[in-house]
Amino acid sequence: MRQTMLRTTLTLPLLLLPIVSHAAPSISVVPPTKTITFDDAIDAQQSYLFDANSDGEADVIFSTVDTGGFFTAGPGPNQIFVDEPGLEGSTAFTPDLRIDLLRGATGSVSFGYATIDTFPGVAQVFNEDDERIADNTFVGGFFDLDTEEECSDASSNCSSFPEGWVDIPFEGTAAYVTVDFDADFSAPGLTEDPDVESEFESFGRYIIDNFTFTEAGDQIISKFDGADPEFPVLPDPFDPENPEFAFELELIEDGLGTLFPIFIDPVVAVGYEYAVHTADTFVTSVLIPSALPNGDSEFTIDIEGITYTLTAGVSFDVLTETGINNVSEFKILDIDTSEALDPADDLAFNTGLTFSRSGTVSVTQTPITQDVPIPATATLFAFGLILFGMGRKKMSLQR
C-alpha cells in the first residue's frame, strides 16, 4: 500500500515534548532565538537556505543528496509537532538530512518531525573541526491531539503518523547537524535503544518543522565560505593579462562542495575551459540549472574533442553520455554574446558540477573570449560555479 504525507492549510500550536535523549551532556540550555518554519521552501530543491538576520546572506542551509530534492507536503492536520509546510524528504540515505549552521550555534538545536513508520533515528551535532559534540537517539510516537498524552496507536484522535520533538543540548559551538531518520547505529559512540525495532523492509519519508537554534556570532565560519551564491569565493589574484581563474576548494564529505553548492565567481566571455588539477579526481556530471535571463538555454559541451548538447535544467551525466569515466577537462561553449551581464551578478551563469570524491580539489577555468561590440556602459557577466553533491536515486514510498 502506498503511503503519502498529505498537504493541508491547517496549522497547530507547537508543543515541546522531549523524546529519547542519550549521550548529550546535562547543561542549562539557552532558549532558542530563531525558529525556521520552512514557509517559503520550494519543492524539488536539494538545498533550502535560511537568512536568520535578514541581511541577505544565508545563515543556515538544509541539504539532501536526494536528486528529487525536498518537498513541503506534510502529514496532514493531525500532528502536534509539524505545522505545514515543513521540509519533507526520503529516509533512504545516510544521513537523510544535513543542517549547516554557517554562523555556528550555541546551547541547543531542536526540531519537530514526523515519519511514515516508527523509525529509530539519530541526530548528531559537530563542531568546526568535525568533532561530534552531542547526539540524540529518538523514536516517534502517536499523541492524543487533545490531552497530548501518548497513544497506543494511530486512533481517530491521535497523530496520523509517528512524530516527536528532538532537542539536542551541547557545549561549545555547533557548526553542523546530521539527522538519520532510519538510523545506522554503527557509528562509534552510538547506542541503539533496545526497545526500538530497527529492521525495516523499505525506506520511507520524513518531514521536519520549527527548527530552533541560537546563533553563535556574526561571522560566517571559514569552512563555509562560498556556501551562499550571493557571496561567492573570488579568485585571488586575478591577472587580466593571463585570465585564468584558479581556485583551491575544500570539499567536505557529505557537505559543502559535495552535498550542497560552493560558489565561485570569475568574470567571463562566451565560454570556458575547465580543468581539474587534483590527481584521481574527475568530473562526473555537469548542470546549468536554468536558462539565462535573455533565454539562452542550449549550449555545447566539448569532451576530448567530441561535442554534445548541454541543455539548461538537464544534468549531463558524463559516463552515461560519453562512456568516459575519467574526465578532468572539458569546455562549455556557445554562450550567446547577447547574455552579457553585470559582473556583480553572481548568479548570471551558474554551472553545477559533481566530482568523484571529496577532499581538496584544485580547479581552473580559462575564459574563451570573443570581440563583440557592446555599449560602453555594459560589462561582461559574472559566472558562478556550483559543485553539487553526488546525486542518488530517490526511494519510492511503496511498501
Image: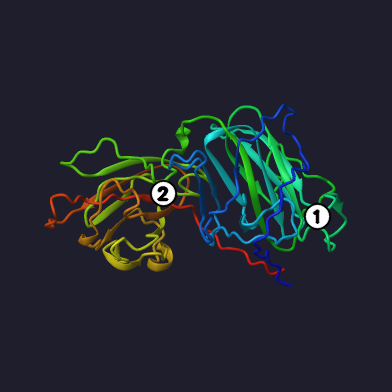
Label 1 or label 2, whichever comes before in sequence order:
1
At which x and y percent is residue 197? 81, 53
In the image, taking residue 198 as reference, residue 7 lies left or right, namely left
Q: Which of the numbered marks, if any, corresponds to residue 190?
A: none
In the image, taking residue 313 as reference, residue 83 lies left or right, namely right
* Residue at the (40%, 47%) spot, across then down: 229
At which x and y percent is residue 222? 45, 33
Q: Quadrant of the N terminus?
A: bottom right
* Residue at the (62%, 62%) spot, across then down: 73
At which x and y percent is residue 351? 36, 55
Q: Residues within 10 Å of mark 2 (few under 14, many from 20)?
A: some
At which x and y percent is residue 368? 20, 54
How is this picture coloured? rainbow
Quadrant in the rendering for residue 374: bottom left
Q: Amino acid at mark 1?
A: Leu
Quadrant in the rendering for residue 248: top left
Task: Determine whether 54 is above or below 386 in the image.
Answer: above
Relative depth, front residue between 131 and 361: 131
In the image, taking residue 193 as reference, residue 33 lies left or right, namely left
Q: Amino acid at mark 2?
A: Thr
Q: Secondary structure at mark 1?
A: loop
Q: Nearer the viewer, mark 1 or mark 2?
A: 1
Taking the view exactly as shown, the residue that stands out farthest to the bottom is 1
Q: Residues within 10 Å of mark 1 (few under 14, many from 20)?
A: some
Residues under labels 1 and 2: Cα distance? Answer: 53 Å
Taking the view exactly as shown, the residue that stands out farthest to the right is 152
Q: Which of the numbered marks, if any, corresponds to residue 145?
A: 1
Q: Which of the numbered marks, if any, corresponds to residue 281?
A: 2
